[in-house]
Amino acid sequence: MKYIDHIADPSRSCAIVAHRGAWHQAPENSLAAIENAIAGGYDIVEVDIRQSADGVLFILHDDTLERMAGIDRIPEEMTIAEITSLRLRMADGGPDQPFTTQTIPTLEQVLETVRGRIFVDLDLKDLEMMGIVAAKVKEMGMADQVDLKARAGTPEALAWLARQKGINGIPFMGQAFFRIGSAEETAKAVIAARPFMCEAKFDELETLAGQHERLRNAGISLWVNTLDPVSCCGLTDSAALEDPDAIWGRMMAAGISVIQTDQPAALKAYIEARRA
């Protein structure tokens, strides 16, 4: 099934996005974390993309290698041979985590690993790479399995998107912040971008919920992050582990049908318990 068709399927359960892979038993953004996400049966895996000094796309979140590889260097200033020679620390890294045999993968390695197995959210750490990333996705015949994303909730964002001709044919996810007083205008701009999905932030969950029907009628599903550092209104993974009904359940009731989490196993167990 194509990514767009899966998200559009009205019979599906809330889709689970494994943030940087399922990384509790493997280094984040590693091939092992991606394999864990596939084994876990999650819908989507999110990975972070950067470009080496010699022009190769690779997977890493931070703008230095200190947390995950133990060296204080800027990866964009290194060759891909130097980058991929480094071993990654376990889980989310830091000095207390041991080094593993896993290394930083290239985007090409990731796309080959996921082919026909899981959908992929490609998080570009520099949006100017969008054309290059899109070209690699198309070259590998993976356009139906990934998404590219950028802001889509303002006229300025729409003007920038209109200049990105290379992304045509790849599922696009808009990103927008819904605020009281301007939510309708934001929804109008998102719809004009024609994404299949919107990664939404909000000042109150009710603000976003008020635009759900309008967006759904335009064929746009809502994606929200419950990641502790970037969540909205205290709707965090940590809070969900204590009271999933108050966080994940409340979000689903508001029309959110895609949740990105650092706790994919707990979210899956909650969704399955709701269906039982």
Image (cartoon, helix red, strand yellow):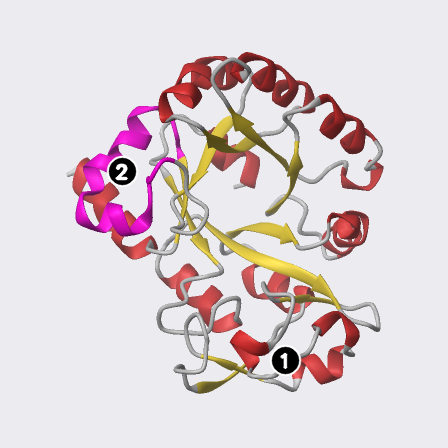
Q: Name the quarter where the C terminus is drawn.
A: top left
Image check: 206 left or right of 140?
left
Q: Residue at x 48, y 64 (%)?
A: 34
Distance from disc 2 to disc 1, alpha carbons, whole Å, reads 37 Å
* Secondary structure found at label 2: helix
Q: Nearer the viewer, mark 2 or mark 1?
A: 1
Q: Residues within 10 Å of mark 2 (few under 14, many from 20)?
A: some
Q: Position of residue 139 (x, y in %)?
A: 78, 55
Residue 236 counted in the magenta span: yes
Instruction: Specify the amino acid type for callout 2.
Output: Ile
Q: Quadrant of residue 92?
A: bottom left
Image check: 121 left or right of 259?
right
Q: Residue at x 79, y 32 (%)?
A: 160
Q: Residue at x 62, y 72 (%)?
A: 105
Q: Which residue is mark 2?
A: 247
Q: Of 166 and 199, which appears nearest the observer?
A: 199
Please say whether residue 268 is visible from this viewpoint.
no
* Secondary structure found at label 1: loop
Magenta region: which residues?
Answer: 233-257
What is the number of the mark on residue 72?
A: 1
Q: Residues within 10 Å of mark 1 (few under 14, many from 20)?
A: few
Q: Position of residue 113 (x, y in %)?
A: 56, 66
Q: Of 66 and 119, which appears nearest the observer?
A: 66
Q: Position of residue 178 (x, y in %)?
A: 51, 24
Q: Is residue 95 above or below residue 131?
A: below
Instruction: Specify the amino acid type for callout 1.
Output: Asp
Please say whether residue 196 is visible from this viewpoint.
yes
